[in-house]
C-alpha cells in the first residue's frame, strides 16, 4: 500500500514512511492510494472469527510489506487486548464501549498500535525519534501510556493549561521517563498549531527526527477501524445494519468508521455528534467550511475548531457515486443538553454516560426519532470516571475509581509551562 498527500505536492510513500513522517512534507495528510475491499464471506462469517484475526485482516493491506505478517499479528493482538463490548442501553440504542483500555478512552487503540509500529521501525536506529503530539485531553494519556518505555523514542505532549480534566492531566504528567508534558498557556488549537509549525520546520524536524502521534498519523487513524468491525460482529440483526453515532472532535474516529464502510462494512448511516464546536454541522448545511476558535466545553476532548481529519472524509467522497450527505449527517449539542442527558439516561435506563458519550447518545436518539424502525449504536469513547467532576454532581453520587486511576491520582504532576509561541517550543525541544 502506498499513501499520497492530500496536498498532492509530495511523493507517494509506504506505510513505514507515512508513520515516521506523520504529515507529508507538503503539510498534507496522508491517504491510502486505494481502499481495500473485504470479501462478502468475511462479513458473513464474522461472528465466528476472533477479534485478533478480524483486526489483522482489516489492517494487513494498509501495512503492506512494511512489517512482516507475524509481527503485525502480534501488534494487533496487543492493541486490542481488552474487551470492547456492545451494551444495550434502550430498546433501539446500544453503545460500543471503547474505553476499557489502560487510559480509559478509545484512543488507547490508536496509540498502542502506533507505538508498537514505530518501536518496530526504529529498533535498529542509532538516533532517537521524538514524537510530538498535541492533546485536547485523552490523546496525551493514551500516547503517554502507549509509548512509555519504548526504546529509542522520546515523547513530548502539548496540552492546554487548565482545559483538561484532573484525571487526564495526571495520566500525561506523572509517568516521567521518556514522556515529557508541556503545559501550554492557550487552547488545544494553539497546541495543534505549534505542532504543525514544528513539522513544517524542515531543519528542526530532521534534527530531532520529529514525528507526530496525533490522529493525523496513519498508524493511529487506521486501527480505529477495528472498533466498527467488532461492533458489527456483536450486532444481532445483520439484516438491518446499524446507524452509528460517533462523538467527534478532530474527526479521526468517525473518519476511520467511514473508511471501514468503504471497505465493505454494512452501515445504515453515520452521525457525527458534536458539542458547540460545530464547524462540520455548519458545513453540512451550508457547504462552507469556516474554522473557528475552539470553545471550551464539558466534552473537552471534542473542543476542536478546525478538525484535521475532515479533509480525509471529503477525499473519500470526492469522486464517489453518491454524496457525503447520503450516508453522513452532523449535529451539535450544548453543555446544558449534555448534562440533562447524562441525568436522564442514568435515571431512566441505569446507564452512566460520560459527556462525550452523552453527545453520541443524543445524536443517535435524534436521528432514530426521525427514522422510526431503525436501530443504532453510539460510541462511548471514555469512561465516565475521567470526568467525575462533571458527572458526579449530576447523578448525586460518587463513582468508583478503577484501580489504574487510583494509583496515579496520588502521583506528583511534572510539566513545563510555556506560552503558545513557537520560539518557546523550539527552545524546549532543543534542550531535551
Ligand atoms: C478524542 C476524543 C473524542 C473525539 O475523537 P476524534 O477522533 O478527535 O473525533 C471523543 N471522545 C473522547 C472521549 C475523546 O478522547
Image: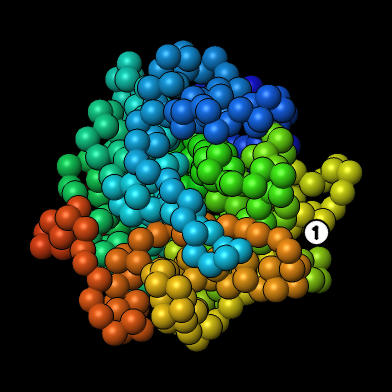
Name the side, left or right, on which 29 lies relative to 180: right
The residue shown at (62%, 71%) is: 365
Tell whether 38 sits left or right of 121.
Answer: right
Residue 380, position in %: x, y?
47, 59
At x 31% / y 25%, what residue is drawn?
127
Residue 203, x across and y down, in percent: 46, 38
**Picture coordinates of residue 296, whole percent (x, y):** 46, 77
Q: Would residue 287 be seen by someone viewing this image from the given angle?
A: yes
Residue 248 visible in the picture = no
What is the tally of numbered marks visible in this picture?
Answer: 1
Question: Quadrant of residue 23 in the image?
Answer: top right
- The quadrant the N terminus occupies is top right
10 Å neighbourhood of mark 1: few (<14), some, or many (≥20)? few
Residue that carries the numbered disc 1 in the rendered image: 325
**The C terminus: image quadrant:** top left
**Residue located at (10% from left, 62% from top):** 410
In this picture, residue 309 sits left or right of residue 318: left
- To which quarter of the image does residue 238 belong? top right
Ligand 1 within 8 angstroms of badge 1 C-beta:
no
Front position in the image: 157 or 103: 103
Q: Please indicate whether residue 106 sits to the left or right of residue 255 in the image.
A: left
Which one is nearer the viewer's eye here, 323 or 231? 231
Q: According to the image, what is the colour scheme of the structure?
A: rainbow
Q: Is residue 42 above or below residue 85?
A: above
Residue under the image location 62 percent in, 58 percent down: 376
Towards the viewer: 118 or 410: 410
**Residue 71 versus residue 202: which sits nearer the camera?**
71
Disc 1 element: helix
Q: Classify residue 307 by image quadrant.
A: bottom right
What is the x, y in percent for residue 391?
Answer: 34, 77
Amino acid at each position: 500500500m502506498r499513501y499520497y498527500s492530500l496536498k498532492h505536492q509530495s511523493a507517494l510513500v509506504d506505510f513505514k514512511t507515512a508513520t515516521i513522517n506523520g504529515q507529508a512534507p507538503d503539510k498534507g495528510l496522508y491517504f491510502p492510494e486505494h481502499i481495500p475491499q473485504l470479501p462478502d464471506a468475511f462479513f458473513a462469517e464474522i461472528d465466528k472469527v476472533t477479534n485478533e484475526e478480524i483486526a489483522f485482516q482489516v489492517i494487513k493491506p494498509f501495512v503492506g510489506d512494511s512489517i512482516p505478517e507475524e509481527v503485525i499479528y502480534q501488534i494487533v493482538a496487543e492493541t486490542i487486548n481488552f474487551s470492547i463490548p456492545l451494551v444495550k442501553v434502550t430498546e433501539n440504542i446500544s453503545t460500543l464501549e471503547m474505553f476499557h483500555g489502560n487510559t480509559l478512552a478509545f484512543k488507547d487503540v490508536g496509540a498502542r498500535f502506533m507505538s508498537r509500529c514505530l518501536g518496530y521501525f526504529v529498533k535498529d536506529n542509532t538516533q532517537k525519534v521524538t514524537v510530538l503530539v498535541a492533546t485536547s485531553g485523552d490523546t496525551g494519556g493514551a500516547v503517554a501510556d502507549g509509548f512509555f518505555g519504548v526504546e529509542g523514542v522520546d515523547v513530548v505532549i502539548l496540552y492546554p493549561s487548565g482545559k483538561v480534566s484532573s484525571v487526564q492531566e495526571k495520566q500525561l504528567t506523572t509517568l516521567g521517563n521518556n514522556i515529557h508534558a508541556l503545559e501550554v498557556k492557550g487552547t488545544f488549537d494553539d497546541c495543534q498549531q505549534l505542532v504543525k509549525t514544528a513539522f513544517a520546520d524542515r531543519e528542526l524536524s530532521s534534527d530531532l527526527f520529529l514525528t507526530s502521534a496525533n490522529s493525523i498519523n496513519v498508524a493511529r487513524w487506521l486501527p480505529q477501524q477495528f472498533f466498527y468491525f467488532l461492533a458489527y460482529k456483536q450486532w444481532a440483526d445483520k439484516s438491518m445494519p446499524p446507524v452509528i453515532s460517533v462523538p467527534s472532535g478532530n474527526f479521526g474516529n468517525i473518519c476511520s468508521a467511514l473508511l471501514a464502510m468503504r471497505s465493505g462494512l454494512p452501515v445504515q448511516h453515520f452521525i457525527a455528534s458534536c458539542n458547540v464546536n460545530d464547524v462540520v454541522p455548519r458545513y453540512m448545511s451550508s457547504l462552507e467550511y469556516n474554522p473557528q476558535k475552539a470553545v471550551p466545553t464539558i466534552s473537552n476532548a471534542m473542543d476542536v475548531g478546525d478538525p484535521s481529519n475532515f479533509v480525509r472524509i471529503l477525499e473519500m467522497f470526492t469522486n464517489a457515486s453518491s454524496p457525503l450527505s447520503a450516508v453522513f449527517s452532523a449535529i451539535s449539542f450544548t453543555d446544558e443538553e449534555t448534562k440533562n442527558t447524562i441525568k436522564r439516561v442514568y435515571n431512566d435506563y441505569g446507564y452512566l454516560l460520560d459527556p462525550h458519550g452523552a453527545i453520541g447518545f443524543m445524536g443517535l436518539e435524534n436521528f432514530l426519532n426521525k427514522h422510526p424502525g431503525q436501530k443504532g449504536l453510539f460510541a462511548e469513547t471514555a469512561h465516565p470516571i475521567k470526568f467525575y467532576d462533571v458527572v458526579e454532581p449530576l447523578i448525586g453520587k460518587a463513582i468508583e475509581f478503577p484501580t489504574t486511576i487510583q494509583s496515579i491520582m496520588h502521583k506528583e504532576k511534572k510539566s513545563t509551562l510555556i506560552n503558545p509561541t513557537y520560539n518557546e517550543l523550539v527552545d524546549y525541544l532543543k534542550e531535551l
